[in-house]
Image (cartoon, rainbow, N blue to C red):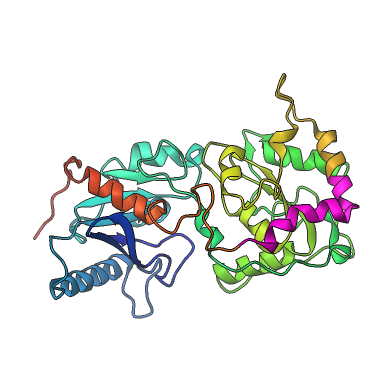
Amino acid sequence: FHLIDNALWGETDGSALEGTFDCNMGPNFCTFLSTDAVPSVDGSNLVQNLRQKFLKYVNSMKDKSTVQEDPLFVALYNIHTWRTLSKWPHYPDICILPTNISIVESEESHQRFHRLFLNSFQGFDGNSTTHPSSSIQRSYIREFGSSPLLPVFPYNQKVKAAAFVASTCHNNRGRTSIRESIVRELSKSIRIDSLGKCKVSSKIYNDTVDLKFGKNADETLALKRHALSRYLFYLAFENTIEPGYVTEKVFDAWKSGSVPIYLGASTQCRKMMPSNHSVIYVDDYINEDNGILQIQKLVQYINKLMFDKIEYDKFLAWRKTFTLKQQYRGELSTGKDTWPCKICKWAFENRHKMKQKRIKCSD
């Protein structure tokens, strides 16, 4: 049982997700392959990269006596890249990759990109996003094991402020987004350093940390986490608030040793966190009767932690016993609950009721 992973979001070395996974499916295993997101140095394009790797793997499988039945090949396309690389109506490239099942995937919010799925990718058998309505729901849970925890910067040397990092300020028909509105309200009472391109608070202090960019995505992420480690708090505010949409922001905070103040899908976020006392949730300060955020209560609590090391350190106490190998709440699983295994099981269970591909391949 095998899958082809088209690694097109953030990685350019084809190593986003590879290897063989035992998904507790009896004799069936699933194997992920990746391909480069950009043309290689020899000039070959994405489709050629895909086809070469696919055929090489197919040929290697023919020589393995351990394979007891015909493999089931699944193509996994990134929605944002494939839309720009393929012509309308963006059908799966089954003429190049003769796979049995084609899935389109995204880690972006359903609210911002649902039209792509509804209109542009009707020829695919299923989709995989963070939204519960997906055929296979996915998450950023892989951030748990993507890199080690940074050492905690000494409390007395941390910047007594909250960092805010966003590459884009989001506006809806001229109205400021909920995310930026709350940041602005908080900045009236506590110091907030805007380190990204979205300068909600533009004031610069002598100890404001300079956020640098690396040569690639991984290096830039490492530099971001090192910058966050200098701050007591990080405003881990999602750009979209919807069920299931928990991105890397909250993971950036606890990886760096900064306490995250989280705005987003708090129900799902709580299930992913290493402790019940590791995140400050904005939702906890919303009045249940009228739905209004009690901003001053949130400010008071942040200010208390800012000058109370004992209480602040309680949010980092989980680090003393946490290990990446542990499994808790069914979220950080190394087996059947991981995203690759969810795709394996979904494809295997739905292999007999796939859509008729509305495309003809020329000789």
Q: Is residue 14 left or right of residue 26?
A: right
Reply above or below: 69 against 350.
Answer: below
Residue drawn 27% across and 69% down? 48
Q: Which quarter of the image is occupied by the N terminus?
A: bottom left
Residue 163 appears in view: no
Q: Which quarter of the image is occupied by the C terminus?
A: bottom left
| Residue at far bottom of view | 42
Q: Which residues are magenta?
A: 302-322
| Residue at far front of view | 321
Residue 357 at x, y percent in the picture: 18, 45
Q: Is residue 202 left or right of residue 280?
A: right
Q: Main secondary structure of the magenta part?
A: helix
Residue 159 at x, y percent in the picture: 85, 61
Q: Is residue 318 magenta?
A: yes
Reply above or below: 176 against 320.
Answer: above
- Quarter location, residue 205: bottom right
Residue 272 at x, y percent in the picture: 57, 48
Residue drawn 33% across and 51% down? 343
Q: Is residue 108 magenta?
A: no
| Residue at far top of view | 289
Residue 108 appears in view: yes
Reply above or below: 26 against 267.
Answer: below
- Quarter location, residue 232: bottom right
User: How many numbered discs sit on the rendered protein?
Assistant: 0
Q: Looking at this view, is 336 or 71 the one in front?
A: 336
- Quarter location, residue 59: bottom left
